[in-house]
Amino acid sequence: MQTSLYSDRTTLFLQMLRDARLTAGKTQTQLALALHVDQTVISKSERGVRRLDVVELHAWLSALGVPLLDFVAALDDGLSAIAIRNAGGRSRQR
């Protein structure tokens, strides 16, 4: 399993975080104000420099009006697509 901070899976998650914010029409500063954190926390989280735990993710999504279960379902779909794509490129040699 690839564990790099910049794996395809992590890139997908970070893009989905950013897209959720943009779809909600919020700037990083507006989201930071809603979460009572500094704007740099949002920036670092969206860039993958800082990781979110599930409780923070819930607060983040709530501030954007995005249900956690909807986000996770979409993430799961995307991760499954990545897994299928990566499995297709593997050699069957042992």
Image: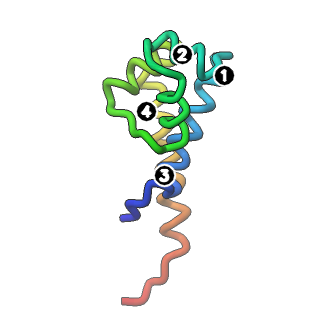
Q: Residues within 10 Å of mark 4 (few under 14, many from 20)?
A: few
Q: Amino acid at mark 1?
A: Thr
Image mark for residue 72: 4
Which x, y percent locates residue 3?
Answer: 38, 60
Q: CA distance from mark 2 to mark 1?
A: 9 Å
| Residue at the image position 42 percent from the left and 89 percent from the top | 93
Q: Which mark sits nearer the N-terminus, 2 or 1?
A: 1
| Residue at the image position 63 percent from the left and 31 percent from the top | 19
Q: CA distance from mark 3 to mark 1?
A: 21 Å
Q: CA distance from mark 2 to mark 4?
A: 14 Å
Which x, y percent locates residue 28?
Answer: 60, 23
Q: Amino acid at mark 3?
A: Arg
- Residues at marks 3 and 1 touching, judged by CB atoms closer than 8 Å: no
Q: Which residue is mark 3?
A: 9
**From the viewer's perspective, is residue 62 above or below residue 53?**
above
Secondary structure at badge 2 equals helix
Q: Nearer the viewer, mark 2 or mark 4?
A: 2
Q: Which mark sits nearer the N-terminus, 3 or 4?
A: 3
Quadrant in which residue 54 is drawn = top left
Q: CA distance from mark 3 to mark 4?
A: 13 Å
Q: Which residue is mark 2?
A: 64
> Is residue 1 or residue 94 the one in the foreground?
1
